[in-house]
Image: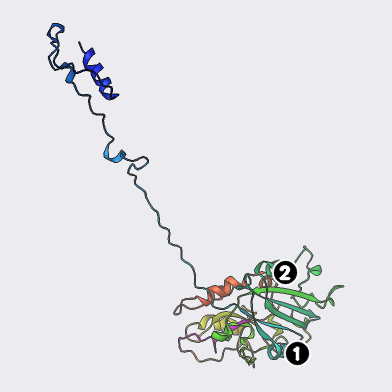
Amino acid sequence: MKLFPLIAAAVNAQNINLPDLSNFDLSAFGLAPDAFNVQPAAAAGPADGERYFFTAATTTTVTTTTVTVPPVIAGTSCFKCDQMTYATCGSLGTYQMCPSGDFDCCFVEVRETKTELKQLCTGCKDKTACEDNKAENFQGVNSSTHQCRPDYRQQRVGQRGPQTSVCRQCFMTCDPAVDANKCFGSVALDNTVGGEFKLGFSTNQANYPWKGHFKGTDTQALGIPTLGSLDATTDAVVITAIEGKASLLNVYFDNDADGKDHITVGDSVRSSATEMTFWSVQGASMAWWMSDLKTIQMALNNHVANVPIAASDFA
């Protein structure tokens, strides 16, 4: 009979004072003398790992992803000019620190009429705004109605031929205090032009698609640095291609006698001061005006030193 031990346990649990029944003779009931001395069983405690709420041991697997970030070209400046000739652009232009949000983008806008340069503008521009302007170059399927008509046949033939062609592009910012050779025209802070090259459109126009439609004269020009300096030893193959005028028609060397001739002796070291290449903002193809110059510049700037630069690296 287990009734009394259960009652005793329940009473003890509630701390109720009852008379001491331990001396009663319970043998008549088949109980031992100490039947009322039964202590309640201790409640089972929580396991060690469950002693605190929400503290059960867990195993967390952390996956680490390594992201390779390409080096950033130093500089938040653009060379700013709004002139009618390359010469006045180089001599009267100034550098401007681009405002927050424009740190990685310079713009260029070129206006031509009947193959002649009428206005050259460059400076800082918000990246989105620059790309929006660039997208206006070739609106519509009829090339004769495009704002940008870089093929000189388009500027001399047809009803809209005489109308002004307006072309826009975007390129990297720079730091003229660190390396002005990576800025527009390689113009130094004191307006010394370091990257002037001769555009041989008249002399060499047989190599260009428009051929005899260019009516101007060869001229000294400033251009956008590709950020790819070509050494005569390391990069001999691509230099030969540029000099041959069969490809890379819009890539020029820093040579005021003929921008298509590389004149630096190779020493297996690329120098931005003497071996920088440039894109001309005149005579370029439609594909060039549509290309992502900033991506190309970044790749050329970070090109492995001992690996030859190829023609495809400029596209």
Tell me where residue 90 appears, x and y as whole percent: 68, 89
Q: Secondary structure at mark 1?
A: loop
The image quadrant of residue 225 is: bottom right
Q: Residue at x 37, y 50 (%)?
A: 61
Q: What's the residue type where badge 1 is placed?
A: Thr
Count neighbours of disc 2 (C-alpha within 10 A) and say few if under 14, some if 14 to 19, many if 20 or more.
some
Tell me where residue 213 appears, x and y as whole percent: 78, 81
Q: Residue at x 58, y 80 (%)?
A: 174
Height in image: 52 above or below 254? above
Which secondary structure is most common in the magenta stretch?
Answer: loop
Count neighbours of disc 1 (C-alpha within 10 A) and say few if under 14, some if 14 to 19, many if 20 or more.
few
- State the extent of the magenta-drawn residues as a range: 267-278
Q: What's the residue type where badge 2 is placed?
A: Asn
Q: Is residue 167 left or right of residue 60?
A: right
Question: For the image shown, how many numbered marks are present on the structure?
Answer: 2
The image quadrant of residue 172 is: bottom right
Q: 222 or 9, which is in the foreground?
A: 9
Height in image: 149 above or below 10? below
Q: Secondary structure at mark 2?
A: helix
Q: 117 or 59, which is in the foreground?
A: 59
Q: Is residue 30 left or right of residue 242?
A: left
Give the labeled residue for mark 1.
217
Task: Evaluate if marks 2 and 1 touch, with contact meaning CB atoms under 8 Å apart.
Answer: no
Magenta stretch contains residue 275: yes
The C terminus, quarter of image: bottom right
The N terminus, quarter of image: top left
Q: 116 or 125, which is in the foreground?
A: 125
The image quadrant of residue 82 is: bottom right
Magenta stretch contains residue 19: no
Give the labeled residue for mark 2.
133
Residue 95's disc is: none
